[in-house]
Image (cartoon, rainbow, N blue to C red):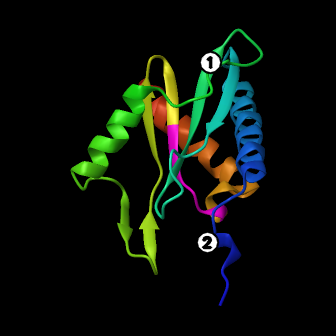
């Protein structure tokens, strides 16, 4: 039985998700009377193995877009360290796995690490993820 929503998303899926995430974050910025412009860029996983993750970089910027295309080395190191300590939010086997996304902060930018599973890169996921990111950032910064 084929489960298309459990397959890896295409590059086009990930780019569309990133554009929708930026739009949703901009809506939240307007609702919360915030300032600044968002740059949201997707970085593909470094490998295509089962359990691979894509990374979405979220920056506040004065420019229309950021030139950074790769996940910074420091973020990659944190991801590798978590995986090595068996603290990575993914469990399972070749047949089935359960994975979670997580948000990292580095160098003034947020990095949203997401499993490469199509259902997590849909338009509905972008809207849900934007809300979660806003709630997380506001709780860390002391806003409510």
Left or right, 144 with reference to 13? left
Residue occupying the point 45% across, 57% down: 100
Question: Does 78 sit left or right of 69 as displayed?
Answer: left
Q: Along the line of sight, which residue is nearer the eye, 48 or 30?
A: 48
Mark 2: few/some/many CA within 10 Å (<14, 14-19, 20+): few
Confirm whether the magenta stretch covers residue 28. no
Which disc is residue 60 wearing?
A: 1
Relative placement, left or right, of 100 versus 40 is left
Q: Is residue 14 in sight in this rendering?
A: yes
Instruction: Name the residue beneath numbered marker 2.
Output: 6
Residue in the foreground of this view, choosing between 48 and 123: 48
Quarter of the figure that contains the N terminus: bottom right
Label 2 residue SS: helix
x%, y% of residue 81? 27, 42
Is residue 144 among the parts visible in the rendering?
Answer: no
Q: Is residue 38 above or below residue 46?
A: above
Please identify, in this view, whether the residue under mark 2 or under mark 1 is nearer the observer: 2
What percent of the width, then of the height, locates residue 103? 46, 39
Query: Which residue is at 49% across, 30% downward?
Result: 138
For residue 36, side relative to residue 137 (left or right): right
Which quadrant of the structure image shows residue 23? top right
Magenta-highlighted residues: 112-118
Work out whether residue 72 or residue 144 is closer to the camera in this orientation and state it: 72
Residue extending furthest bottom? Answer: 1
């Amino acid at each position: 039985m084929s489960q298309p929503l459990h397959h890896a998303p295409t590059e086009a899926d990930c780019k569309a998700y990133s554009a929708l995430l930026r739009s949703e974050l901009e809506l939240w910025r307007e609702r919360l009377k915030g300032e600044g412009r968002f740059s949201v860029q997707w970085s593909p996983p470094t490998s295509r193995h089962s359990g691979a993750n894509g990374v979405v970089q979220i920056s506040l910027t004065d420019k229309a877009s950021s030139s950074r295309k790769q996940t910074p080395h420091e973020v990659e190191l944190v991801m590798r360290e978590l995986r090595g300590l068996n603290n990575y939010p993914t469990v399972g086997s070749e047949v089935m796995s359960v994975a979670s996304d997580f948000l990292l902060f580095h160098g003034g930018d947020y990095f949203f690490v997401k499993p490469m599973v199509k259902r997590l890169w849909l338009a509905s996921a972008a809207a849900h993820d934007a809300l979660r990111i806003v709630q997380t950032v506001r709780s860390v910064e002391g806003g409510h």
